Amino acid sequence: MEKTTIEAREQEFIADFVELNDWMLQYEYLLYFMDDIHEIPENERTDDLRIQGCVSNAWMRVTTDGAGPLHIEFASDTLIIKGILGVITSLVGNASCADVLKWAPQFIEKTALKRQLNIDRQKGVTSILKRLKEACRI
């Protein structure tokens, strides 16, 4: 089976999301991705894992050996952010750091998420993506 790129998985997500054409159906679809999250246990949600700039409480831990795929763990107290974290996990879950560093995320800009997320939540998502890329630079 051929490995798909982050960009190809993202384009598929965008097409599926847009095709739903109704915010409530799109929101349900987004929440479906929560199943992809490896959740950080509550007792491990420390300040160093907290996503700064996120309006909701959100934590992220990324581990990698630099060459192999990423291992991503998330937690959030907000459903929409959990769904977005799940989307991110499904997009980059088997990717290498090199692939993540080349990726220019578009799934917020090219979907109704841009309209549905207030500016503070958009900043939070930007912080999540920035932290993900920083983990790949180590």
Image (cartoon, rainbow, N blue to C red):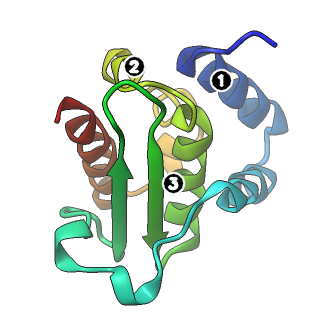
Q: Quadrant of the N terminus?
A: top right
Residue to which mark 3 is pinned: 85
Q: Nearer the viewer, residue 132 or 67?
A: 67
Q: Indicate whether 10 appears above or below 20.
A: above
Marks 3 and 1, how far apart in space?
15 Å
Mark number, residue 9: 1
Q: Amino acid at mark 3?
A: Leu
Q: Nearer the viewer, residue 104 or 100?
A: 100
Callout 2: SS: loop
Mark number, residue 103: 2
Within 10 angstroms of label 3, few (less than 14), some, or many (20 or more) residues? many
- Residue drawn at 37 percent across, 24 percent down: 67
Within 10 angstroms of label 1, few (less than 14), some, or many (20 or more) residues? some
Callout 1: SS: helix
Q: Amino acid at mark 2?
A: Trp
Q: Indicate whether 138 appears above or below 79.
A: above
Q: Quadrant of the C terminus?
A: top left
- Furthest toward the top, the residue is 2
Write down the quadrant of residue 97 in the picture: top left
Q: Indicate whether 121 appears above or below 26.
A: below
Q: Indicate whether 40 appears above or below 28.
A: below
Q: On the picture, is 88 further left or further right than 136?
A: right
Q: Earlier in the sequence, mark 2 or mark 3?
A: 3
Q: On the picture, is 25 further left or further right than 54?
A: right
- Residue drawn at 25 percent across, 46 percent down: 131
Q: Amino acid at mark 1?
A: Arg
